[in-house]
Amino acid sequence: MSDILREFCAENFTDVPAAIEAGARRIELCDNLAVGGTTPSLGVVEQTVAYAHENGARVMCMIRPRGGDFVYSDVELAMMETDIFSACEAEADGIVFGCLLGDEQQGYRLDEEACARVMTVAESAADAFELEHLDVTFHMAFDALPPEAQKPAIDALAELGVTRILTHGGVAGTPIMGNIDRLRELTEYAAGRLIILPGAGITYENVDEVVSGIGAPEAHGTKIVNIR
């Protein structure tokens, strides 16, 4: 197995032990993968973090109050804030979120105000529970942005202190190998500021080919390690 960091996307705890045994060193923990992943329960987070930390892995907790788009009301942002504090109390190693403005017809853009709010809350929660560090991933809401808005979004997210961006490098459902050039372009653009984490369509069978084409240090997926 290559040295690439494999992040396993888990729907609750069920496959976490097998994934870690198979080589996953980071878990993105979600519920409801059928809608792209939502916030897992506190009980699931606590047990997953405990198991992962005992077995040399880290846990990123999805913070997403519902399926659908990534345009959130103030009430939904308040829910996300509460869930961030819960994740930090459970000693998660990081959070995963994404906030946009606009709609499918008019186009989406980064909600910089909401992102700044989330980052401020994340910092406060990490301090409150005396965490040494809290990673922050901006999830595939990034892929809903038009291509011309993606590099400015990288600039803004890097300035806010986001650790990495999870992206397919193209429209959802397109073959990952067809997005290598775009992923490499984004990786080079973000270099030294944040990590571009490729995902969706990456498996234990093609991960080495994908990351070598991109120059990525990490890769993400539900099949990133062979658990069956």
Image (cartoon, rainbow, N blue to C red):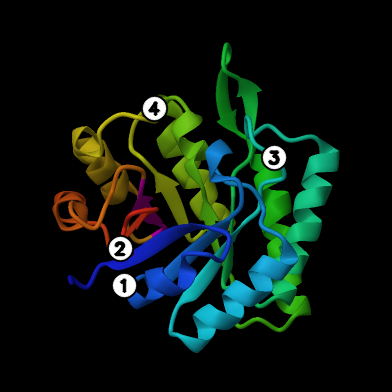
- Give the Cα distance between marks 3 and 1: 30 Å
Q: Which mark is residue 147?
A: 4
Identify which amino acid the numbered label 1 is placed on. Answer: Ala
Q: CA distance from mark 1 to mark 2?
A: 6 Å
Q: Which part of the image, by quadrant, shows the N terminus?
A: bottom left
> Mark 3 or mark 1: which is in front?
1
Residue type (three-letter) at the residue carrying disc 2: Val
Instruction: Give the magenta-colored segment's residue range.
Output: 193-199
Cα–Cα span, label 3 and label 2:
27 Å
**Residue holding disc 1:** 22
Q: Is residue 122 above or below residue 153?
A: below
Name the spot of residue 13 as percent of width and height, x first. 56, 66
Placement of 101 over or under 90, stated as above or below: above
The residue under the point 40% across, 26% down is 148
The alpha-carbon separation of the residues under discs 4 and 2 comes to 30 Å
Query: Which residue matches tag 3?
Result: 66
Task: Identify the residue under disc 2.
Answer: 225
Dot 2, crowdedness within 10 Å: few (<14), some or many (≥20)?
many
Marks 1 and 2 close (CB-CB < 8 Å): yes
The residue lying toward the viewer, choosing from 50 and 172, is: 50
Q: Earlier in the sequence, mark 4 or mark 1?
A: 1
Tell me which label, 4 or 2, sits earlier in the chain: 4
